[in-house]
Amino acid sequence: MRGLWQEIAGLVLPGECAGCGRPRSVLCEACRAALGGSGVWRARPDPEPAGLPPVHAAALYEGPVRSALLAHKERGALGLAGPLGAALAGAVRCAASGPGGGRWGGGGALEAGERPLLLVPVPSARRAVAARGHDAGRRLALGAARALRAGGLPVAVAAVLRQCRVVADQAGLGARQRRANVAGALGVRMGAERLLMREGPVVLVDDLMTTGSSLAEAARAVSLAGGRVVGAAVVAASGAVPRSAEKNRN
């Protein structure tokens, strides 16, 4: 119910840009450009956790991008799901163009007869979702899927992952602590194995990558259940990610 009221408020009340604070704009043109203006790039955390699939990011986690992600996730600015999802869609395209991802590179069309690409969001803790009033990761995955479908690409969102045990808040933890915190914490929902084995390749999606620990754990859980993980995509990446990372233009 809280999420519904947040959506209504976002439609009828004058707002300000979540990136820079300019009035009467959910996200101004300059801040939208910051989400993808420099092109999607391959993000490599240092150190890189074992089992982490290739990760592509739309932007660095700084400035207006950081502000917009926090506004969407923590303050319920649900109108941002559109532009953030569109940025994520660009990262998904690059993530899915690797080996095993079908013909997503270049023209962006899957091979004839291939099943839709599955976007699998990394889940947040249930208590966090309840406190925020919405599931930020799933909402961004749906936004990305809409953007990809608008370009004629067959995509489905499969929220098949669940937390099997309580994990501590990752904020403030180092890379090694984060890996230990999430190790073995994720599994797939009952019956999801058939879906993962029957459908097309999987791209894991999240709003942010810091150390890559959560994405590596998600890849482990999906692969163990029979899914074919070809990559991961995030809106932004932070941590020890070099600015000179390899870039892939959309």
Image (spheres, grey):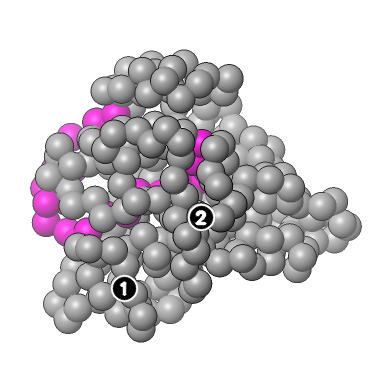
Give how far apart the Cα atoms at labels 1 and 2 are: 21 Å
**Left or right, residue 164 beside residue 88:** left
Residue reaching furthest right?
A: 23
Query: To which residue does mark 1 refer?
Result: 104
Q: Amino acid at mark 1?
A: Trp
- Residue at disc 1, secondary structure: loop
- Above or below 106: residue 138: above
Q: Earlier in the sequence, mark 1 or mark 2?
A: 1
Magenta range: 186-210
Residue at position x 19%, y 68% in the image: 115
- Residue 217 spot, x, y in % from top left: 31, 33
Residue 1 occupies which quadrant of the picture? Answer: top right
* Disc 1 packing (10 Å; few <14; some 14–19; many ≥20): some
Residue 249 in view in this figure: yes
Q: Residue at x 31, y 47 (%)?
A: 53
Residue at the spot of label 2: 245
Q: Which residue occupies the foreground of this view, 139 or 44?
A: 44
For the point 85% across and 60% down, the residue is 24
Residue 30 placement: quadrant: bottom right
How many numbered discs?
Answer: 2
- Secondary structure under badge 2? loop
Task: Check residue 215 for magenta coloring.
Answer: no
Q: Residue 236: where, in percent of width, then height?
A: 56, 49
- Compared with 130, 39 (above or below) is below
> Would residue 46 be found to the left or right of residue 12 on screen?
left
Query: Within the image, what quadrant is residue 154 found in?
Result: bottom left
